[in-house]
Amino acid sequence: MTTFTSVLSPADVAFYHENGYLIVENALSPAEVEELRAETTALCRGERGDIRGVEPADPDESDDDVLRRYLCIHFPHKLSEVMYRYLAHPAIVETLTGVIGPNVKCMQSMLFIKAAGKPGQAWHQDEDFIPTRDRSLTGGWIALDDATVQNGCLWVIPGSHKRGILWPQKDHDNREFDCTIESVGFPYTDADSIPVEVKAGAIVFFNGYLLHRSLKNRAKSGYRRVLVNHYMNADSLLPWRLQPGDRAAIADFRDIVMIAGEDAYAYKGIEDVGGAHVRPSGEGGCIKNPGEKK
């Protein structure tokens, strides 16, 4: 992993808090991008261990045939030492300690492959799926391909995080998007949104309350591969994935990775409860599964 040499400026921090997102260009070197692309292929071929929903590839199958099967794999860092290492890439640590604070933990990774023709994800807020006590949830969206309007880049509604409202959600049957429920009832229109087109190697950071979406990959070929990791202030509890008998006020999900600073709750230990699995794409219709969210 290369040494990231950029310096986060006060203007960058101010932009993030005002708009709810921040783009760090050239955060990864071309060699790092290629390393993550190769690891993506290895995961999809079943070479890193069992992933629920992934069948080991036949040796005669091409990498393209295998990659086109999957939209997204959750928790790839649980099986991949490479994906685990990139949770704390220097560009991520520098940016997050600047916009969140000195103590930062990660609770989730998601690897989007999104081949040509694969769907996007409807308007949503990440805090609907991963609730933090202090509203510090932040996504780190690492582009492994150039992300364009044509191939289904991220779209955001700048400033939509500022009120701190989680808008209602509902199921949908729009085949433009995958099976994840969508946010509705917010006082914005599609005209308020902007595309976030970035080059491979860029990282887009965004607040957990920011409304964002992506559209179908309409390119004739290729992928829009992205590794998305979610982070928060390690001083806050994480009442995520509550179990029977848990008290929401003091619940604290402990399947985490510290990437900076100190863990105030280290005395609780670290758990290993999340497993790598494939997200349903919805191309054949969505099977309702309440536990299959972010």
Image (cartoon, rainbow, N blue to C red):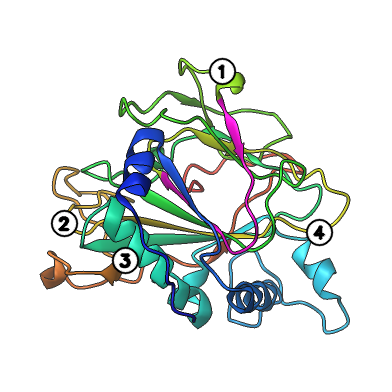
Q: Is residue 96 above or below residue 271?
A: above
Say which quarter of the image contains residue 206. Answer: top left
Sequence-wise, the earlier of marks 3 and 4 is: 4
Q: Nearer the viewer, mark 3 or mark 1?
A: 1
What's the distance in space between the residues labelled 1 and 2, CA to CA?
35 Å
Residue that badge 4 annotates: 222
Q: Position of residue 64 (x, y in %)?
A: 83, 68
Q: Residue at x 33, y 53 (%)?
A: 9
Q: Looking at this view, is 119 or 248 the one in front?
A: 119
Residue positioned 34% across, 64% down in the render: 94
Q: How far separated are the C-alphas under marks 1 and 4?
A: 30 Å
| Alpha carbons under labels 3 and 1: distance apart | 37 Å
Q: Nearer the viewer, mark 1 or mark 2?
A: 1
Q: Mark 4: which amino acid?
A: Gly
Residue 233 position, x and y percent, is 24, 55
The numbered mark, 4 or 2, whose residue comes first in the sequence reads 4
Q: Quadrant of residue 107?
A: bottom left
Mark before the other along the chain sequence, 1 or 4: 1
Q: Quadrant of residue 43?
A: bottom right
Decide: is 145 above or below 243.
below
Asked whether the residues under the numbered discs 1 and 4 touch, taking CB atoms below 8 Å apart as contact, a structural biologist would say no
Q: Secondary structure at mark 1?
A: loop
Residue at disc 4, secondary structure: loop
Q: Which residue is mark 1?
A: 189
Residue carrying label 3:
255
- Mark 2 lies on residue: 235
The mark closer to the camera, 2 or 3, is 2
In the rendered view, does 47 fall on the left or right side of 88? right
Residue at x 34%, y 45% (from the top left corner)? 11
Q: Which residues are magenta?
A: 193-206
Name the one closer to the observer, 196 or 8: 8
Q: Is residue 45 above or below residue 188?
A: below
